[in-house]
Amino acid sequence: MSNCDIVKSIKIGVPLALAVGILWWMYRGIRWEELEDALSHRMSWTWMLLSMPFGILAQVFRAMRWKQALAPTGEHPRLSTCTHAVFLSYASSLVVPRVGEVLRCGVLRRYEGTNFSRCIGTVVTERIIDTVLILLLSFLTFLTQIPVFLTFFQHTGVSLGSVLGTFSLTGYLVTAACGILALLCILLLARRFQFFSRTKSMLSDLSNGLLSIRKVESPVLFVLYSVGIWVCYFLHFYLTFFCFDFTAGLGPLAALVTFVVGTYAVLVPTPNGAGSWHFAVKTVLVLYGVEQTDGALFALIVHTLQTLLVALLGIWSVVALAFRKA
């Protein structure tokens, strides 16, 4: 086996092993009968189905924003190709975390002849904008939820220390490990993008992509796309609260806190945040009074079905692009 094969095996094997390890630790005490009962009798499939279009719409908005960001660089790919590229980028990240950013640029290069470095530049710009939006959302969420947490502690007579004390040492270790891996993921992404700026021409194309946001035809529309992406992501998640009686009454702010924490958990380099997302979501739900088992089942069911949607969209794009000439 060559060094390249070893590196590829590590990129796939380590994140997968991490996800399996966290999931095993979380669900080792849950019986399959409990999961079957939740799916058959305790879950409203109507609300789950209603949440799915928002997951699709979020990716379509991302494709529309990307097409708009590419225009100032002189690239004008078809919206359908941009959409398929986005679908494939999310689906591919289920196998190799974080590979999607590069893959979707490769799709445009193959089917639209776009400049790869310019595409990478616009992707980096998108990520920066998304980071700013999620940080702003996190700050606003924190401010709105301070009274809720204080009221919760006051009425229940529970202190923050006692709440944190309900989590085991293993739980704290998992949290710390997830945080460290998220930071490593960010560093690896930074090094990956540095690879594309080794020559002056590549650096120029990358810069054009990065600065494309300044020259978009309709800045207002660009902002609406950006906000629409995250509104759809939130609704995709929030509507699943109504699938279960133990989360239906928590309200949109509780869902927003869970959504924000889960968004950070996805930074951990596991397939679609598997394991880390489950742990983060369950932990927040427990803070809002949901039983440990119910919180774990909610995370498992929601994540599995939403991941299945991502995979199906990726498969559909593979089939659609197979009938299109490169």
Image (cartoon, rainbow, N blue to C red):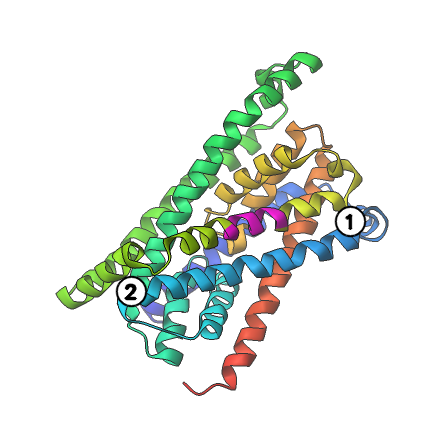
Amino acid of disc 1: Leu
Q: Where does the image place residue 15, in percent across and percent down from the top left? A: 48, 54
Q: Which one is nearer the viewer's eye here, 155 or 11?
A: 155
- For the residue pair 138 and 172, the one nearer the viewer reads as 138
Task: Estimate how packed mark 1 is, as few (under 14), some (14 to 19) or many (20 or more) residues with alpha carbons within 10 Å.
Answer: some
Mark number for residue 35?
Answer: 1
Q: Locate residue 211 relative to residue 67 in the image: left or right.
A: left
Say which element carries label 1.
Answer: helix
- Return the x and y of residue 246 as percentages of the image width and height: 77, 36
Q: Is residue 326 above or below residue 167?
A: below
Which region is colored magenta? 228-235
Residue placed at 28% from the left, 71% from the top?
74
Which of label 1 and label 2 is nearer to you? Answer: 2
The front one of 145 and 74 is 74
Where, by quadrant of the figure, is residue 200 drawn?
A: bottom left
Instruction: Provide the major secondary structure of the magenta segment.
Output: helix
Q: Quadrant of residue 154?
A: top right
Residue, disc 2: 72
Q: Name which residue lies at 46% across and 57% down.
A: 97
- Whether pointer 1 and pointer 2 mark residues with C-beta atoms closer than 8 Å, the reply is no
Tell me the number on the disc at residue 84: none
Residue 52 in view (yes/no): yes
Q: Earlier in the sequence, mark 1 or mark 2?
A: 1
- SS under mark 2: helix
Which quadrant of the figure has residue 287? Answer: top right
Three-letter amino acid code at disc 2?
Pro
Q: Is residue 290 above or below residue 118?
A: above
Screen quadrant of the N terminus: bottom left
User: Residue 27 in the image: x percent, y percent?
Assistant: 68, 44
* Residue 314 x/y as whole percent: 55, 69
